[in-house]
Amino acid sequence: MYTEIGQRCHIVARMLFALILCFSVFSGGRIYGVSFYRLSREGYSSATETLLIVITNDAGNPLNRSWLMMYDEASGSVKRVAIPKNASPCDFAWPPDRAAFVVTHYEGVTFFQKDSSGYGYKPKAIRCPTDALYMCCSCSPNGEWLAVNCPDRKSIVHGRLGFYRFNDKKLVRTGLGLDHRQVVWGNDGLLYATNNNSVLAIELKAGKPRVVRTVPLKKKLTIFYGMFCEQPLFQSFDEVRLGDKMLITLDQPAKFRVIATEMVVFVSASPRLLVVFDRSGHEICGYDPGRLIRLGSVKDPNTVYALADSYLVRICVENGSLSLDTVSDLHDASRIKFGEGISCRK
């Protein structure tokens, strides 16, 4: 949601393609070893108070090592989500105000609706074209549409924009060309994506996209985080920029993690820097958290979920002050079988 899929030309893209291939098969037993965790920007649901997390295991067979977990905010418990065909997730998003979520994976898209028991989610495969991969996804603010970046199977760097209207029969892959980066909604009829080092403002009418504005970037685009006050928020190697304004830079290239809510921008930079900016790009506050924070999912306009090694943390900015709370240790979640659940509070 999402997600560092940055391109240092074709090398990183090919590495990502290999990673997706590695994630495409899953084995059902217990998995042991070192685990890594990943969040998505739209991975939290305020309607169900639930957070989705991907856990990747670095031991054993590299083809059987990634799966989706569901963290219940109220109880602190974690459960494992079964995806049809044992597919491994690329991205995931909750439609606003619905007890349902969407997962993109190598072969397609799956829609999960809460079942009648109220304890689980029933999966339904969305019909998709077979000549594409299914990667970054984003739900429209009114919960009517899902936008998906669908790169060609033969060339992951070049893709096309796909749309799915919830409750329709299939996802439609349009002719609008994109690169491999994130897609982000501005409002119910306006979507932002990137192509050729430019940001495209895409208007959606009757399910048909039309580029209404192009924003060329003066700096080389590596990662796109979305639009903020009509300005593109993006990374350019060792900088994070809001339009022409540089928000943060380091003397040497660093690992950035950036996430924007409707009110503020959180920026984490390795090894130990966490800064919050307002909508105009002015710094609100910042401090040294003592560890690398990997920003991940928006909870509300002032709060996000993030990761620090195996710990799930919640970060909030209020009245110009920043707070960081450790919510859970996810270490034992890598050993959960389907149908099981554990309490994951610290």
Image (tube, rainbow, N blue to C red):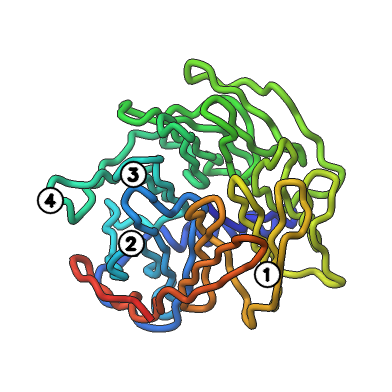
* Residue closest to the eye, 95 or 286: 286
Q: In the picture shown, does residue 95 fall above or below 338? A: above
* Residue at mark 2 to residue at mark 1: CA–CA distance: 26 Å
Which residue corresponds to mark 1? 274
Earlier residue among tags 2 and 1: 2
Name the foreground residue: 341 vs 10.
341
Q: Amino acid at mark 2?
A: Met
Pick whichever of labels 1 and 3 is earlier in the sequence: 3
Is any atom of residue 108 visible in this view? no
| Mark-to-mark CA distance, 1 and 3 | 35 Å
Element type at mark 3: strand
Of residues 310 and 32, which is closer to you in this image?
A: 310
The Cα–Cα distance between marks 1 and 4, rounded to whole angstroms, is 41 Å
Dot in front, 2 or 1: 1
Q: Are marks 2 and 1 in contact (CB under 8 Å)?
A: no
| In the image: residue 314, left or right of residue 166 | right
Q: Residue 192 at what x, y percent from top left?
A: 63, 35
Rendering quarter of residue 130: top left
Mark 3 or mark 2: whose residue is earlier in sequence: 2
Residue identifier under label 4: 117
Q: Which residue is rendered at x = 46% and y = 63% of the image?
A: 22
- Front: mark 1 or 3: 1
**Within-10-Å neighbours for mark 3: few <14, some 14–19, many 20+:** many
Q: Quadrant of residue 6?
A: bottom right
Please give the name of the residue rendered at 31% of the width and 44% of the height, measured from the top-left corner: 100
- Between the residue at mark 3 and the residue at mark 2, the CA separation in whole angstroms equals 15 Å
**Number of residues whose C-alpha sits closer than 10 Å to that of mark 2, classed few (under 14), some (14–19) or many (20 or more):** some
Residue 110: assigned label: 3
On the image, the x and y values in percent for residue 196 come to: 75, 38
- Tag 2–tag 4 contact (CB < 8 Å): no
